[in-house]
Image: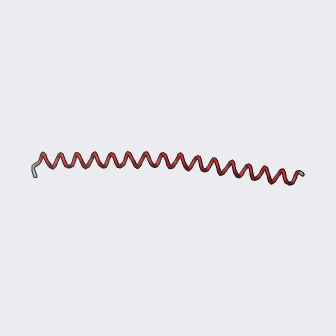
Amino acid sequence: MGMKDQAQQKSEQAQQQAKQRAQQGKEQMQNRGRRRDEDMDEQRRQRESEERFDQDYEV
């Protein structure tokens, strides 16, 4: 294998690694967004539960 072949192989490996890192970063951002949505939903459910509890005692 010549020097040119080795350089090309290293370049291709670097490109693959960059693609993998980009995909992982994209997935992490999606997961963060999903977790944030889930946290907001949980907070809303908690508030609604507390409001229902308060209403039960007001009657």
- Residue 32 position, x and y percent, is 52, 48
**8, above or below 57, in the image:** above
Image side of residue 38 versus residue 4, left or right: right
**53, above or below 11, in the image:** below
- Residue 17 position, x and y percent, is 31, 49
* Residue appearing at x 39%, y 47% in the figure: 23
Image side of residue 49 versus residue 42, left or right: right
* Residue appearing at x 43%, y 45% in the figure: 26
- Residue 36 position, x and y percent, is 57, 47
Residue that sits furthest to the left in the current view: 2
Q: How is the image coloured?
A: secondary structure
Across the whole image, how many numbered discs are drawn on residues? 0
* Residue appearing at x 19%, y 49% in the figure: 9
* Residue appearing at x 74%, y 49% in the figure: 48
